[in-house]
Image (cartoon, rainbow, N blue to C red):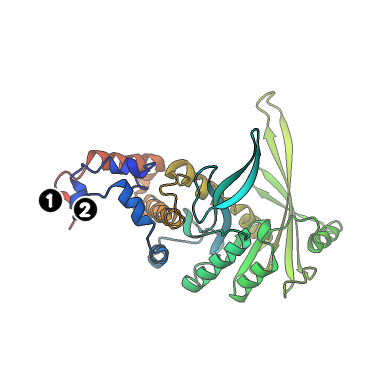
Amino acid sequence: MLFLARLASLNALEQTRGRPWWRWWLGAGLPSADTLGRVYTQVELDELRGVLYRLYRAARRKKVLRSRKRGLWVLIVDGHESHASYRRRCSGCLERRITTSTGERIQYYHRQVTACLRVDWGTFLLDAEPMRAGEGEVAAALRLVTRLLRHVPRAFDVVVVDGLYAQAPFFQLVRRAGKHVVAVLKDPRRDLLQDAQGLFRVLTPQIRYRGRTRCQVWDQEGFTSWSEVSEPVRVVHSLETTRVKRQKDKTFEECQATWYWVTTLPVAAASSAAILELGHGRWAIENEGFNELVTHWHADHVFRHHARAIEAFQLTAFLAYNLFHIFVARNLKSAHKHLASCLHWARLMTADLYTGTWDAPGRLPP
C-alpha cells in the first residue's frame, strides 16, 4: 500500500493508522514507521525475490506477459545509483571522493544492477543485485544473471546491455546457458570495432527508417577479432539522421547519431531491423523503469538506511510496480484505460487509502 498509493515515506503511511480498515485487512493495527523500518532490516531477501519470480510465472502462464516484438523474450540489464549522501552510511554503502568548493569530501552511495523484461505493455521488473565495495558493475551483473538463470531460466532469450558489459565473462556466461547477447560496442581501442569500421567502409549500407529517422545500416557476421569469446560475433552499425525543427527560427536541421552493436544473434534469428529495435529498446529500463520509479514511486527515498532494508524496499517497489501496470494493462477495459493516464489511477488508489472506500467490514471481499 505504501508504494501503490505513492506515499513518500513510512511516516506518511503511519498517518493512516487511524483508519479502521487497517484492522480489517491485517487483523491488527498498522505498525508504526519505526517498527516497519526495523522489520525490513530483517526481511528474507530470497523470499521477496521468490514472490517476484512467482508473479512472473503466474503472469506468463496466464498470458498477461507477451514478448515485445518478433517473438524474442528480451531481458535488459543496467546499473542505477539509487541515492547518495555525505553524512549517512551503512554497511552496504560504497564510497567515493568528491571535490567540492569546500575541499574533498567522502560521499556514500548505493548502486545496483537491475534486470527487467521488455513486454508488450512496458517493462516487468524482475530482480536487482547491489554492487559491493571494490567491485565493478559487471561483477554484480554476473551474480544477477546467474540467479535468474537458476530460478527463471526460460524467462528470456536475449540479454540487451550497455557497452560496459561487452566483456568476455558476461558473454560466455550467457552463451553457456543457450541465450544471446546484444551489447553496445563503443570502445575505440577494441580490435573488433576497428576491424568492423574498416570493413564497413567498403560495403554498401542498407537504408531503413525508424519513424522520422533515416538509418544507414551495415550488418556483418563472422568476426573473430574478439579472441576472448569462443565463437564468431556479429557487428551491426547504424548511421542515423533525424530532421529536427529548431524552435527559435522554425528551421530544420539534421542531427546524426552513430551506433555500433555486437551480438551473438545470427542473421537467421534476427534481422538488421530487429537488432536496431533491440539496441534502442535498451533505453526502456531508463525511461519506463528508473525514471518512473524515482519520479512517481519515490524509489530514491531511503525508507531505512540499512543495507538489507534498502534492498528489501526496492524489491517491494518492484512488486508494486509490476502489479499496478499489470492491472492497468490487463484489467482495465479499453474504453476506460484510454480516458486517463496511469497517474490518474494511482491518485484514485491514494484517495481510497486516505478516505477509506471500504467503510464497513461487510464491503470487503471474503
Left of 361 or right of it: where is 269? right
Q: Residue furthest top?
A: 249
Is the residue 228 above or below the residue 26 in the image?
below
The answer to whether one can see residue 270 in this image is no
Front label number (1 vs 2): 2
How crowded is the residue under tag 1: few (<14 C-alpha within 10 Å), some, or many (20+)? few
Q: Mark 2 = which residue?
A: 25
What is the three-letter code of the residue carrying label 2? Trp
The residue at the point 65 percent across, 27 percent down is: 247
In percent of width and height, residue 112 lies at: 54, 56
Image quarter of the C terminus: bottom left
- Disc 1 is placed on an element classified as helix
Q: Quick check: can you spot residue 303?
A: yes
Residue 130 vs 33, above or below: the answer is: below
* Residue 343 spot, x, y in % from top left: 40, 40
Identify the residue position indicated by label 1 in the image. 362
Could you tell me which residue is drawn at 50 percent across and 73 percent down? 150
**For the residue marked with disc 1, what is the amino acid?**
Gly
Say which element carries label 2: helix
Tell me how far mark 1 sits from mark 2, CA to CA.
Answer: 12 Å
